[in-house]
Amino acid sequence: MSPANLSDRLAQQRKLISTAYDPQLVRDAGQRLIASLVTHLQTVQAGQGQVLNWQPPTENIALATERLQQADRAPELNADQLTARFTELIEQTLQHGQNLHHPHYVGHQVPASLPLAGLFDAVTAITNQVMAIYEMGPWATAVERAMVHELGAAIGFTPGKFSGLVTSGGSLANLTALLTARNVTLGDSWKTGLAHSQLPPVLVTHAEAHYCVTRAAGVLGIGTDQIVRVPLDRQRRMEPAALDRILIELRQRNVPIVAVSAAACATPSGAFDPLVEIAQICRQHQVWLHVDAAHGGAACLSPQHQHLVAGLELADSVVCDAHKMLFIPALCAFVFYRQHEHRYAAFEQVAPYLFDPSVPGMAEFDNGITNVECTKRAAAMGLWGVWSLFGRQLFAALVDVTLDLAQQFYRLLVEQNDFQPLCQPPCNIVVFRYLPPTLRDRSPAEIDAFQLRLRRAVIEAGDFYLVQTSLDGRSYLRTTIMNPLTTAAHLRQLLDCLREYGQKLLP
Amino acid sequence: MSPANLSDRLAQQRKLISTAYDPQLVRDAGQRLIASLVTHLQTVQAGQGQVLNWQPPTENIALATERLQQADRAPELNADQLTARFTELIEQTLQHGQNLHHPHYVGHQVPASLPLAGLFDAVTAITNQVMAIYEMGPWATAVERAMVHELGAAIGFTPGKFSGLVTSGGSLANLTALLTARNVTLGDSWKTGLAHSQLPPVLVTHAEAHYCVTRAAGVLGIGTDQIVRVPLDRQRRMEPAALDRILIELRQRNVPIVAVSAAACATPSGAFDPLVEIAQICRQHQVWLHVDAAHGGAACLSPQHQHLVAGLELADSVVCDAHKMLFIPALCAFVFYRQHEHRYAAFEQVAPYLFDPSVPGMAEFDNGITNVECTKRAAAMGLWGVWSLFGRQLFAALVDVTLDLAQQFYRLLVEQNDFQPLCQPPCNIVVFRYLPPTLRDRSPAEIDAFQLRLRRAVIEAGDFYLVQTSLDGRSYLRTTIMNPLTTAAHLRQLLDCLREYGQKLLP
C-alpha cells in the first residue's frame, strides 16, 4: 500500500473508531439498555414467560454466528442504525437466556442476583477498572480491601491478623488456597516441583467435596489418586473420629499431608461439617485446614444462621463466594487466610514492568502478587455497592428468607405421599424424589432414570428450573432456593408441575 | 425467638428484599448511571482532568470502608434516598479510578475499552447469565462458541478441527493450556501426580516470558527451577537455533519436556517470536508448542499486521486476550487447541449434580468440563456484541491505528536529543529513556533510579500514565498505545511533560 493510501485508510479507521467511542452513542444505547432490562426484570420477576428459554446448542450457536457474519458483510452504519441494532442484540440476548429472576428458578447455586450489583459492575466494565497493581485500580483495590476486612471480621478472623483476596470464582479460589497450603506444607515445591518429593503427598477431603477441590489435586501435581476421602456420618458430614484415624495413620507413615479440606456446606447435600471439632483435630496433627465455604460462608452475616459455620474462623484458609449466597452476579469469590503472612505463599514472581521497585511498600496493595490473575476485574464492586446502599442487614435477610423457605418446602414434601425428601435440609439445598405409588415397585435403575427424564421434560418446557444429583449411586431431584422472590406458593406449583409431567412420562 | 417474632422478622426481611429487587429502583438508578457515565466519558475522552486519580491506598480503603459502616448504621431508606445514595457511590467510584479513556493513558496493556462492550457486560451482570453447563447459560455458551469459531478461524486454525474456550484472564488461560500440555505430555500426571515422575520434567520458555508462564511451572508441580529459558536474539525474540540445541540436549538426556512456550509478543519488549521456524523445530522434536499471544494475537484480524503472528496456526495451544488488543473490558481470554481432541485433556471430574448423564451429547457444550471455572461469567458477550455492531473491521482498525501511532512515537523519540528509544517498536509497546545531557555522565544506577523517580512523579500528578520496565538489568520507561483516541500531539505533550518533571527532579 502506498503511503497516501495508507494514510487514507488510517483516517477512515480513525473515523470508525471515533463512532465506536462516541459518548452520544453510549447514551442512546445505554438508555435503551436500561429500558429493556427493566421491562425484562418486571416480566420475569412476575413469573411471566419461561424460566429457561431452551433451544438446542447448535441452533443458538448458528444464531450468534449469523450476527457476527452479518456485521462483517454490512456497510458502515450511522448512529441511529447502530442504536437500533444494539437494541436488537440486547433483546435477542434477553430472549435466549436463563431467567434466574423468575420465581420458578430453583436450580443451581447461582442466585437471582441483586440487579443493582450488576449496575455497579457496569461502571467498572465501561471504564475498565482493573487490578494487578494498585495504581491501575486504586478504587477497585480499596473496595476489595474494604470488603475483605468486613467479611473476614464477620467470619470471626482477628482484624489485623488475617488477609484475603477476591478471585474469579470458587474453583479458582479453592485452587489458590490449596496451592498456598501445598507451598507452605511441602516447603520448596514451588521451586523444585513435586518430582523431587520423597513420598507422594496426599490431600484429605470431605467425601463429597466439590469437584474443584479434587481437581486441585490434579492441577497442583499432587494427583487425584492421592486424595484421601474422609467418611461421612448419616447427615453426610465429615466424621471427626474418622478424620482423626486417617491423620494418625498418615503421620505414622510419614506421608506429607497438603491439607484437610472440609465443606460448609457440601454441594450435593448442603451438609455442614463440624468445623470446631475438625479444626481441633487438624491442630493436634499440625495439618492445614481448608474450608470450602463457597456456598455456606454467607451464613456468618445472619445472626440466626451463623451457628452453621461456627469454627470457620479456626481454619487456615477459607473460600466464600459472594456470587452464591450474597446474591452478587458472577464472579466474586473470596479467599481468606487466618494468618496474614500466608498471603504471599501461593505465588512468587518477578515482573519488572509491573511492580515498581522504587515504592516497595506499595506491594502490600498490588493484588497480582497474591492472585492467579494478573489483570483482574474489579469483582467486589457490586458487593461493595449494594452493601453501601442497604447495609449488612440485606445479606442476613437473603440468607434467612431462603433458608426459611427451604424448611417450608421440606415440610411440604413430607406432607405429600408421592414425594420423598432425602433429609431435612441443612440450608437452602433440598434433595428429593418424585415417587408415586406406580413407580415404587420398579427397579432402582428405572426409578433413577425416571427422575432424570422428568427433570429434563420440565426444564426444557421452561416451567421450572431444577437440577439433579446422585448420592450413593442413586439419582435425585435437587433444588436450591436461590431466588428470594420465590414463595411457598411457587413451590406448591412445582410439585403440581412435576406430578403433571410425571404422569405423562410414567412407564 | 418466638415463632411470632420470627414470622414478623421474616416479613420485614421480605420487604427489604422486595425494595432491593424493585425494577423501578433499577430504572431510576440505571438512568442516573448512564448519565454519570456519559458525562464522565465525555470529560475523560476530551483529555480533561487527571489520568490517574492518585490517592494513597490507606486513604482510599478508609473511604470505601466508611461507606459500608455508614450503611450498617443507617436506618432503612426510601427509593429516592436509595437513588441519591446510589448516584453518590457511582460518582465516588468514577472520581477515584484510573481513567483509561483519557488520551494521556499510555500505560499497561489494558485498553481504553470499547464502552459499548461494557453495556453488553451489563446485561449479563444484571441478569447473571453464567456457564458451567449449557442449560445455565444457553445464549452465553452460544456467543462464546461463535466467537471461538470466528477468532480461531482468523488465527488460521482449520474449522472443525480446532477447539477453544474463554476463561478469566490471560494468566489463567496460559495455566489452562500448559496444564493440558502437561497432562498430554506426561501421561498420567493428572491421576498419579508428579511425585511419581522418573525424571523431573522441564518447561522451555521465551527468556522474557510473562510471569504467568513461569508461575505455571510453580502451580502445576513442575517447579520454577525446572524452567529452561531460550536465549534471545538482538530484537529480543526467541532464537530458533538456540531452541533446537536445547531440545536436542534435553531429548538426549531423556528429560520430559512439558512444552515450549513462545511469545507473540513478549510483554516487556513487544518482540514477536519467529513462530514458523519454532513450530518446525518443535514438530521435529515432537514437543508441544504453546504460544502466549495474549497481546499480539489480535493482529490476526488486521490484513496489514497479521504477518506478525504468522505461524500461530501451527501451535498446539494459543492464548489470546480480547481484553488487550481487541479493546474489550477485563476479563475475556481465549485458549485455542489446534487439535479438537485436546479440549478435555486439562481436567477430569465427576459432578453428578452438574452434568446430566441422560443427555451425554450435551457435554460438548458444557463449559465446566474444559475450564478451571465452574460457574463462569458470560465473558465473551462484550466482544460478540461489539463485533455484531461493527464487524471485524473495527478490530483491524484498532490494531492498525495503535500500531501506527507507536511508529510515529518512535520517530518522534529518535528526533529528540534528550530521549533514547530502546529499539524500533515491533507493535504498540514503546520502550525508551529520558536522558538529557546532564544525566549522561551519571552512573547506570543513578540513571536507572531517575527513570523510576520521574515516572512516579508524573503518574502521581495524574498528567500522564506510563509504566517502567527492566531489561538486562537496566530501567526504562515503557508506554503502550492502548487508547486509540491518543494522537501524536498527545505524545509530544508526553515528552514535554517528562522534560518538565525531569528538569525539576534532576540530581
Image (spheres, coloured by chain):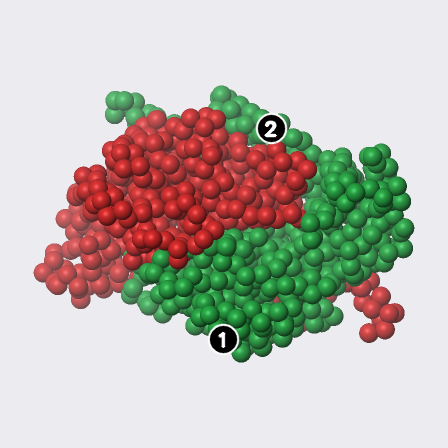
Chain colours: A green, B red
Residue A26, x across and y down, in percent = 54, 40
Q: Earlier in the sequence, mark 2 or mark 1?
A: 2
Q: How many numbered discs sit on the rendered protein?
A: 2
Q: Which residue is mark 2?
A: A58
Most foreground residue, B358 or A321? B358
Quadrant containing the N terminus of chain B in the rendered view: bottom right
Does B248 appear above or below A258?
above
Residue shown at 43% from the left, 61% from the top: A200
Q: Amino acid at mark 1?
A: Gln
Q: Nearer the viewer, mark 2 or mark 1?
A: 1
Would residue A345 appear left or right of B358 to someone viewing this image?
left
**Label 1, residues with CA under 10 Å away: few <14, some 14-19, many ≥20:** some
Alpha carbon of mark 2 to alpha carbon of mark 1: how far? 52 Å
Q: Which residue is mark 1?
A: A286
Q: Amino acid at mark 2?
A: Thr
Does B222 appear above or below B364?
below
Say which quarter of the image contains residue B475: bottom left
Residue shown at 53% from the left, 49% from the top: B373
Classify mark 2: helix, strand or loop.
Answer: helix
Residue A306, x across and y down, in percent = 69, 70
Q: Is residue A437 visible?
A: yes
